[in-house]
Image: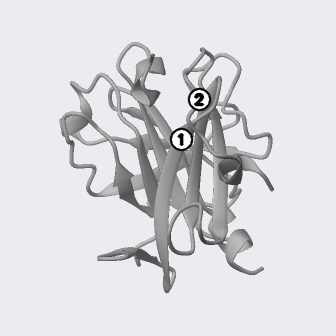
Amino acid sequence: MPTPMGFLKNGAILLSVLVFTTAASAQFDSSLGVLGADRRKGCLMIRNPSVKLDTSITVVHNRTEPRVSFENLKAGRKLDKDCTTVPAGAGEPDAVFYDVVLPKSALEINGALAIVYIGADARASAAGWKLGGKTVTMRECSSNEGIHFTAWDGKPLLSARLWHFYYYAGIDIEANCKPKDYQK
């Protein structure tokens, strides 16, 4: 069974990025997203058409093996097209794409998986992350051909889901998601 990292090819890195936008769900739609990369070239996929150049990006859920520090990440220029390494695209029809330069520590990575937050006010806490003044916990799971990234208002699957982003991997993966991970 491929792990979520198993679908990454040619040293590509996959990170989920948290950028915020109603209420809670809309707030998180514009501040959460996915970051894919191949070596030092990063691709931020997010439902936010107005991320400013040099906006801070904080990793809030890192599955990199071995652990890599992704500090001081900054959003780059907005791109005209999908910049992912998956031919079919990210899987989110309203995603907008941005360039991201990764640190030198990411040069030798064969794959990564993380959720990140756009903005400078992310703070780690015992209960999860303080993002935009709200305590949030992160989760990712796999479906048959992709990864579902989610943020929750408390314990995952038992509290309200605040954000969801689907990344199409382009290969078969053993599914381990629960219906609450992806149902509206």
Q: Secondary structure at mark 2?
A: loop
**Crowding near the residue tagged with mark 1, few <14, some 14–19, many ≥20 C-alpha atoms within 10 Å:** some
**Crowding near the residue tagged with mark 2, few <14, some 14–19, many ≥20 C-alpha atoms within 10 Å:** some
Q: Which residue is mark 2?
A: 175
The x and y percentages for residue 174 are 55, 23
Q: Secondary structure at mark 1?
A: strand
The colour mode here is: one colour
Closest to the observer, 157 or 4: 157
Q: Which mark is residue 38?
A: none
The x and y percentages for residue 50 are 67, 61
Badge 1 amino acid: Cys
Q: Is residue 67 above or below residue 82?
A: below
Res. 52 visible in picture: no
Res. 149 visible in picture: yes
Residue at the location (71% across, 20% down)?
Answer: 88
Q: Which residue is mark 1?
A: 141
Say whether residue 108 is left or right of residue 158: left
Closest to the observer, 125 or 183: 183
Mark earlier in primary sequence (1, 2): 1
